[in-house]
Amino acid sequence: MKSRGSSPIFALPIAILASLHTGYSADPEDLPLPQWSAEEIVLPEAKATDYRSEFRLGGHLWPEGFTPEAEGGVPPDPNKDELLFFIPRTGKTSPIVRSVPKPQTQPATPLRDLSQEVLSLCETAEPDGYLIDPRTLLHEVQAEDLRRLLSYHTGESKVTTYYLLLDKDEKLPTGADIGKLAAGKLAKGHTCLVVYPMEEPWRVRFFMSRDITDSVSSKYLGEILHACVQDALQASDGVEQIQRFATQLSIRLIWLERAYPTVFAAAPATELEVKLGPAEQWLPEVTPEVVIAPATQTFLPEGWERAAVLLAVSVAGLAVGLLLMILGLRAWRRRERHVVWILPEVEPVTRLGGPHCGGGGASIRYS
Amino acid sequence: LIAVLGHDLVRLDRLTDAAHCLRLREAQQIVEMLDDFERQFPQVFVAIYLGVLPQSLSLKELSFWLLNQAAFNTKRSHCLNEYAVALLVDPVAKNVGLNLGYALEECLPVGFLERTLRAMRTPLWHGEYVTAVRLILKRISSRLRKTARRVPQPRDLGAPENTEAFLDASGLQLLRKSSAASRAPLDMVSKVEDNDSSEDAVQL
């Protein structure tokens, strides 16, 4: 700075360039920008009954072909999930060519019930949070990300979502009172509880408020759960799976809310009313009609699985054949030990003028 | 040959290491192989002689003389030299010879013997006598099986019917015949015990 201030030789060109720059930017008519007329600037007006032309935050994310009619609306087609293009994809979530999912009837490890101590912790831990994870199965940063997402979802949707995290070999006990979870906040308003086993999203249990399950078809709710699980299975990492699950569920719940507006319209009167009775009455479980199962991950190109199976069977057959051959050879050798070989009797021949026994033969030098 | 080696009958073991080429373990391995061979072919035996020969004596001459003048100590005493295979090795002159009894000439022709000896050259050159003997026994066994008759042996051995059958099958050999006098006291003792005569027992 001292040298610049002390040399007037550089000050003059800089001042000239600065004046040219400010003069150029001061005139907006000279900028190479497109010009719009006043008619083009007018945005389309939103209509309460026309869902297609309604302008909403986030763009026209409504699925193609979705024209709900009050309560009997047609659910969105899961095969046309244009919204999935907006979900950030990382390198871990590269699409995997999957075969037909096979139902997993038996878990890899026997499942154990969630202990009463943990359940009591879940009832008291984090009364203001939407993520019930007293044992910190999720790390702090990941849990905070999920909490932010759930908080944002609660602000955007009328359905409050709670997540109870289980370990991969745990399950919810049969007689567990889920109404006491999250300090009893599940009983207020439209709520949904997701009992999520880490790294095993196909075992998710999904509970929704009775007023929603009574009004919305169980098929639609089952498809919501199915879509969330399938999206979670696109990732291999357990943390990313739950992130994808939560994102997809948030989107689907917003769809649900817009597809059935009458269900959520009369909420304010009963929103703060605490429901009484067993939790099964006011928070029933949603059971999907479609069997949700983890897809068998394969790293082989499509069509090579049959060849791999044939190769494995061939190798196993060869191994078994080789083993049988070795066993047979050993048995044959064991049996041959008890065999005696008898040479034919030969009459002695008189040679060299006398009774000799042997002679002739061969000899070599081996050096 | 008779003038050099004489015409006396001699006795020789199946394995004779006059040149001291074998260690004890190797000698035991060779003896085991010879036993196994004789068990498979009860009529045939193999005699091995490792020794340094004088220049005036060839392997063929010595093997011929041994087959006609020597009695080999085999497992079975009734083996005839017509069914003998004599393997002679001179480790100093690096010569090896194979000679047969006349009963084996048709089974083991000279061409086969020469091929077998040529196959033994490498292990013999390395001083691996056990390997060489294993090789020759394997080749001779496979060759003899082509002409021999297969007789399976019963695995379960039945108990002898009486003591005489046991003595016959036990392999016990009588060294000398027992005299009548040596058997008399036993007879007398039995008589004394029967008659309960204490005086005769005192005299005895």
Image (cartoon, coloured by chain):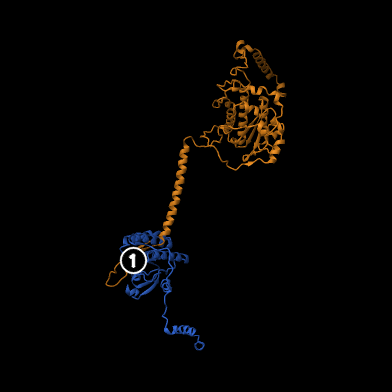
Residue A37 visible at all: no
Q: Where is residue A135 shown, x and y percent of the image?
A: 68, 39
Direction from residue A254 to residue A306 in the image, left or right: left
Which one is in front, A319 or A71?
A71
Direction from residue B165 to residue A96 in the image, left or right: right
Q: How many marks?
A: 1
Q: Please report the residue visible at 33 percent of the width from the left and 66 percent of the height from the top.
A: B100
Q: Please report the residue visible at 55 percent of the width from the left and 39 percent of the height from the top.
A: A105
Which one is in front, A197 or B3?
A197
- What type is the residue that disc 1 sits on? Leu
Direction from residue B68 to residue A170 in the image, left or right: right
Q: Where is residue B12 shown, x and y percent of the image?
A: 39, 72
Q: Residue A91: which quarter of the image?
A: top right
Chain B tint as drawn: blue
Chain letter of the residue carrying label 1: B
Q: Residue furthest top?
A: A38
Q: Residue A62: which quarter of the image?
A: top right
Numbered disc 1: secondary structure: strand
- Residue corresponding to mark 1: B100
Chain letter for orange, please.
Answer: A
Q: Is residue B20 above or below residue A304?
A: below
